[in-house]
Every structure is written in structure tokens, then in C-alpha cells.
Image (cartoon, coloured by chain):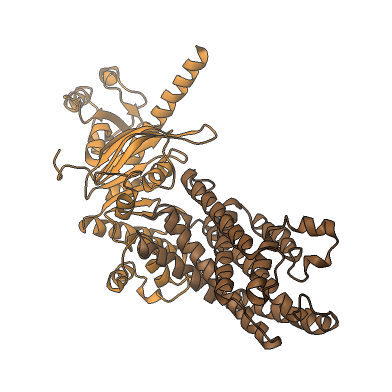
Amino acid sequence: MNAVDEPILRVSNLSKTYAGGFEALKDISLEIQKGEIIALLGPNGAGKTTLISAICGIVRPSSGQVTVAGFDIARDYRKTRALIGLVPQELTTDSFESVYNTVAFSRGLFGRAPNHAHLEKVLKDLSLWDKKDNKIITLSGGMKRRLLIAKALAHEPRVLFLDEPTAGVDVSLRKDMWKIVKELRESGVTIILTTHYIEEAEEIADRVGVINNGEIILIESKTALMQKLGKKQLILDLSESLSALPAAINRHDLAISDDGMKLTYTFDTQSERTGITALLDDLKAAGIQFRDLNTTQSSLEEIFVNLVDESSEKNSAAVNGAAAE
Amino acid sequence: MNLHGVMAIYRFEMSRTRRTLIQSIVAPVITTSLYFIVFGAAIGSRIQEVGGVSYGAFIVPGLIMLNLLTNSISNASFGIYFPKFVGTVYELLSAPISTFEVVLGYVGAAATKSIMLGFIILATAALFIDLQIAHPIIMLAFIVLTALSFSLLGFILGIWADNFEKLSVVPMLVITPLVFLGGSFYSTEMLPPFWQTVSLMNPVLYLVSGLRWSFYEIAEVNVWVSLGSVLMFLLICFSIVVWMFKTGYKLRS
């Protein structure tokens, strides 16, 4: 593999078991290319924050290896940590410090010489420049969130971890955040974000990873994921109400609405034959007329919920199986 | 070496002192002045000389040591405990900085503050008594080494503590009694023989005695034994800090 193909982040067989025996990460492997935006989705306690913390050096992995730009996070920690910026989930700040000083502190801590011009740019990009002399305690929650991003960007990292960046943030600020993330990607920064908000992943991510119970269930490009797992539905608005489905169209596995005015046909976009033509032919033969038709595709949220449910069912089955043995 | 990182921590900690100037500097100076007024002038005038030195002058090294120990511990312990408490420690743990550099930043700043305070107290004392320093280099060595080693102890305490009570229990219940019973305000020769022997088990006695020798050439124990004890304590504390960072004790899960 040449230098161009070398992933900016490679996680190999990473596991973390806490002192109490809780397995937070189970044999996680993933590769992230330079300039990508990856969204890690997962319910609470899935292992998202532990994964980020292990990569950043806050949590010690029990086994496995992580490299950043080809450098090992344990052996070459100075090189890897200098490449990484982390925006934590909690709004943890030094309340009595000024905005500018705390950002300058972060830059120095990460081994970079003072650079007023860079800090000014970061603070201006995040609309914090006019607050630079204010004490952090006086900032609003949204501003504190932006300040944490500014701190993480102060040392010009190449990989940025955003742990639930828009948790508790209003809609307008969330959109601002998405804009910032997109601009950062344009400047060549690789972004890995965890989120509860599916629309966030849908809006900004190139690839989506789903974590549950410490395992990566799936990691796919967003479009491929939608195509692969997305189910489409054809909804027919009938001209006249049906009390029951005629036998002639029973083979199509249709759902009828309570008022009998809507038929819903679910099909797989990836299958060779969707069955739509046959359904329409059968409807015509049965004399069922419709006023309108439209199609809908399942959202990432539905895909996510299905995946997590399936994974949880598998885990419970495995646990029950083991218990039975 | 991540010198920018060390300086960032050092500057941050020093700016915290500026923000809390009254608590950090003014309060110890006022307290010390009160000691001089009460012990030096009011009671001291009725006490005969100790080892050929007026009582007011005799207590100066003890007062400096009392402030050095308590402030070194509280400065360093608060410096590392507060980021743990508010959660900003994540930044320290994810930064490209070694254990030694982190310690250098925090302990360096805590020791600097204590040393400054030591000299401020010395200057305050000069307002009340006729001060003489026989061995200024030895005095400086004692002040610097004590400030460094007890700042390290404070750093250990800050990592160990998981609440504010634990943070204050060691300075209040261990250090202050040891300083008061370590000959800060009296010579152990004034004690019965049994308690003189017991006093020798008090590590603070060696510090006070060594510092007092640098002022007036009077000591409870040999000055080189005192100096050796401080150096040994410094090494022990540093070894504990290295172990804490290597194992991630109370820092990394």
C-alpha cells in the first residue's frame, strides 16, 4: 500500500474491557481515509465515546492496535496526538479563563508555537472573536460548544473527533455546526463524529458506522447503505374504498389502510424484479382504480433502528443459547 | 520535548494565581503578620532568647516552612484536581505531552508560587525583626527543594483525591500538625527527653531545623541530614507521580 492509500486512521481488533468486567469495545476494526466524514451512530452505552477515547489516549485499550497516519498511538503518541483534535461530549471548560487564553492554552499544550493569526481565524470562523476577552462562564451553551471546537482546532489537527457535537444545541446552531464541519472537510480535515441524530449523519457524513454493544455492526457509504438496506414503498390512493383485498391481488403482499382508501406495497430496490408491473396489471384486471400514487424510501433512522434491533436480538439469542448450554 | 506544552500549563497555573491574588498571596502575608504580632511582639517579648536568637527571629524559618508546605500542597493539588473535577483533564490526557512535562508544568508553577510566597514572608518578617541570614545559598536550597517536593506531594494528592474533602484533609490534618509539632515555634530542647525522641520521627523537624540553621547556624539535626532528607522525599514523590501516570492511576480507565 503506498502513502496515498494509507488510511489516516486504522483501528485493528480493538477491545476494551473495564476493571469491572464490562466489555465496552469488542474487536473493533475500521479504516478511515483522509478527508472523509464518518458518522458513528449507536444507542447510549454502545461504545462510541469509549472508541474515541481509546484512539485519543484517554482510555487504555485492552488489546488491539490503532494507527494515525501510519503512527502507532502508543509508541508514537506524540505524533498521533498532535494530529488529533477532540471535541468532547460534555461542555467541560475552565469557567474563569478568557476565551482567547483557553484557546491559546490548547495550542501550546499540543506542542505548537503561539500563532495569533491562526487563533484569530479559528475564533472568527466560529463567531467567537468578539467574545475573545470574555470569561467562559459568561458564554451561552452554544458558544461553549463552539469554543470547544475552537480549542480542538487550535493546534491545526488533521483528524477531528466530534463526540455528539450537536447534543442539546438548537436547530439554527446545529445547521451552523454542519456548515463548519463541511468547511473543515474542504480544508482537508478528516472528521469522525458520533451522534444520536440520524439526520445529522444523513446530512453531512460520507460513511456511516453503526455501533451497538461494543461492536461495529456495519460501516458503509451513506448512499450504499441507503440503497442496500433501504426499502421503498409504493402507495396507491384508491378512487373507491375497499373493504378487503380481492383474491386476485392477494399474492402481492399488500397492506390496506383502515379506511380502505390506501394500498401500500413494500419492495426491495436491489432485487431484480420489484413486482410493480405485475401488481399494476393485476389491479387493472381486478378493476381497482387509483387516483394517485407515490413512492417513499426508508430513512437512515429506520435503517438504524432495524440494525440495532437485529443486533440486540442476535446478542440476546447468543446469551440465551449460552445459558441453555 | 514539548516545551510549548510545559509553558502552556505553567502560564495557565500562574494566571490562576493572578486571578486569586488575595487568596494566594495577601491572605498568607496577613496571617504571617498576625503570627509576628502575637508570637513575636506580644508573647515573644516575655520569652527569653532561644539558642541566642530572639524569639521573634527564631520563629521566622518555621513560619516560612509552614507557608511553603501548606501552599505548595494546596497549589499543586488544586491545579491537577480541578481539571479532573470539571472534566477538562481530557485535554491533558489526549495531548502529546509526557508525564515529566506535565509534572514540570504543574509542579513548576506550584513551586514558583510557594517560593515567591516564601520570599514575601521573609520580607514581611524583616518589617518586624532584625533579620540575619548566615547561609543564603543553603536557605535558597531548602526553600526551593521543599517547595518542589511538597508541590509533588500536592500533585499526588490532587490525583488521588476524588472529592474536595480529601483534598483538604492532608494539609489540615497531617501537614499543619506536623509543622506545629516540628519545632516551628519552639526548640525541641524545651521538651522532655521522650518527646524529643518522638519529634525526631517528624519529617518536618528536619526541614525547619535545616532552614533555621541557614539563618542562625542553630539546628536540632545536622544540616546535611536535613538536606539529604528533603532530596530523598523529592525522589520518592517523583517516583510515585511517574507510577501514577504509567498506570493511569485515577486518571485513565
Task: Mark yes or no: residue B75 visible.
Answer: no
Q: Nearer the viewer, residue A241 or A170?
A: A170
Residue at x-position 39% and y-position 27%: A310
| Position above or below: A103 against A249 | below
| A313 sits to left or right of B132 | left
Image mark count: 0
| Position above or below: A270 against A317 | below
| B245 sits to left or right of A181 | right
Residue at x-position 66% and y-position 85%: B126
Q: Position of residue B152 (x, y in %)?
A: 55, 58
Q: Position of residue A236 (x, y in %)?
A: 27, 34
Chain B on-screen colour? brown
| Position above or below: B57 against B109 | below
Chain A on-screen colour? orange
Q: Position of residue B9 (x, y in %)?
A: 44, 65
Q: Position of residue A45 (x, y in %)?
A: 47, 39
